[in-house]
Image: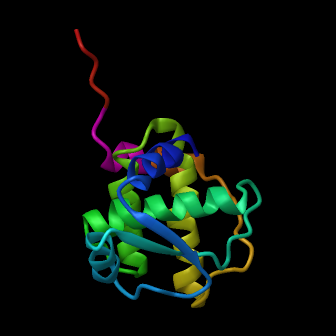
Amino acid sequence: MAHSREVYAAVGSLLTIEFTQRTVYFSPEDILADVERGRLEINTEHCDHPLWTPEENLIFRVVHDLLPHVLYLRPFSLEGEVLSFHDHVRRAPPEARLALFTEIFGYAAIRYSTGVYPDVQRCIAFPALLADYEASFLPPKTHAA
């Protein structure tokens, strides 16, 4: 959450962020067009989370919509969300990676396998899967001599 709060604070002065109970965007290009106008709307539905308050969940949604979907125009699909995870996790601090894995990869898997977002989000940790992912797809850490 610290990572999400940091990004949210950085963009908060650049955008008018509104929260609504409707689906506003149907593609990343829709979000980008709104961001270029200096605004962003975030859907407040399906915001019950076992670890985060609704406010924290919405802060994460702002960051998720901006970083991978706007910067890289990742589509709203299972493949797009997996790529969004990859885009985001490479820029996040190591302590945020497991949460990103759950919140992006896991949540998208539910949505795109069932056709709907669950009313209550679930948290599940797969540290071994994340470790395998990091070993396969993230560059190795380098140490300064």
Residue at 59% x, 64% y is: 58
Q: Quadrant of residue 71?
A: bottom left
Image quarter (top left, top right, bottom left or bottom right) of the C terminus = top left
Residue at 39% x, 88% y is: 26
Q: Where residue 72 sits: x, y (%)?
A: 25, 66
Q: Where residue 125 sits: x, y (%)?
A: 64, 52
Q: Which stretch appears magenta?
A: 133-140
Depth check, front residue: 73 or 44:
44
Left or right for 144, reference 47:
left
Q: Where residue 106 sits: x, y (%)?
A: 57, 66
Q: Is residue 68 above or below residue 29?
A: above
Name the residue furthest top: 145
Left or right for 67, reference 57:
left
Q: Where residue 87 sits: x, y (%)?
A: 32, 57
Depth check, front residue: 30 or 82:
30
Q: Quadrant of residue 120?
A: bottom right
